[in-house]
């Protein structure tokens, strides 16, 4: 198994502020791949429907993530947000359902 894969599996629940787990790593102690995986993991979990919750829209999810202090690498999160905005074609306002795909 590549070392990067093992690193991501072990550290994607760490937080920039050191309040994550399993080791309470912070800031530069967390690799870039693990930081990015943390963003992708939360985004996927929140935008997916579960038996116990509805799926949040991309807009709702990104707003919450951008407001979360200490959880994510702010630079990577901004790049992730930009990537999503440029990956989806604009949806006309009359075709939007509850803000879906309206990454702002």
Image (cartoon, grey):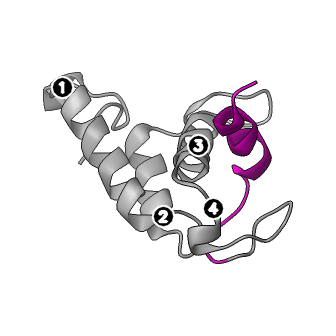
Dot placed on the residue nearer the N-terminal end, 1 or 3: 3
Q: Are marks 4 and 2 in contact (CB under 8 Å)?
A: yes
Q: From the viewer's perspective, is residue 92 above or below residue 99? A: above
Which residue is labeled 1 in the image?
A: 91
Q: Is mark 3 on a helix, strand or loop?
A: helix
Q: Which of 34 and 53 is in front in this view?
A: 34
> Could you say whether the residue bearing mark 1 is in a helix, strand or loop?
loop
Would residue 104 be visible to someone looking at this image? yes
List the residue tagged with mark 3: 37
Find the distance from the CA under tag 1 to the CA under tag 3: 27 Å
Q: Does the magenta stretch include residue 16?
A: yes
Residue position marked by numbered label 4 in the rendering: 30
Span shown in magenta: 1-17
- Disc number lying in front (4 or 2): 4
Q: Are marks 3 and 4 in contact (CB under 8 Å)?
A: no
Mark found first going from the N terminus, 1 or 4: 4
Mark 3 or 4: the one toward you: 4
Name the residue beneath numbered marker 2.
73
**Which dot, 1 or 2, sits closer to the camera?**
2
Q: In the image, 93: left or right of 47?
A: left
Q: Residue at x 53, y 69 (%)?
A: 68
Q: Which of 3 and 65 is in front in this view?
A: 3
The answer to whether mark 1 and mark 2 are in CB contact below 8 A is no
Give how far apart the Cα atoms at labels 3 and 4 are: 11 Å
The quadrant of the picture occupied by the N terminus is: top right
- The x and y percentages for residue 78 are 32, 57
């Amino acid at each position: 198994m590549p070392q990067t894969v093992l690193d991501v599996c072990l550290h994607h629940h760490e937080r920039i502020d050191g309040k994550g787990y399993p080791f309470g790593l912070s800031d530069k102690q967390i690799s870039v791949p693990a930081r990015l995986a943390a963003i992708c993991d939360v985004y996927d979990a929140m935008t997916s429907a579960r038996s116990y919750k509805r799926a949040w829209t991309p807009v709702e999810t990104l707003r919450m993530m951008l407001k979360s202090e200490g959880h994510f690498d702010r630079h990577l999160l901004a790049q992730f947000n930009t990537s999503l905005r440029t990956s989806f074609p604009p949806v006309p306002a009359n075709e939007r359902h509850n803000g879906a795909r309206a990454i702002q």
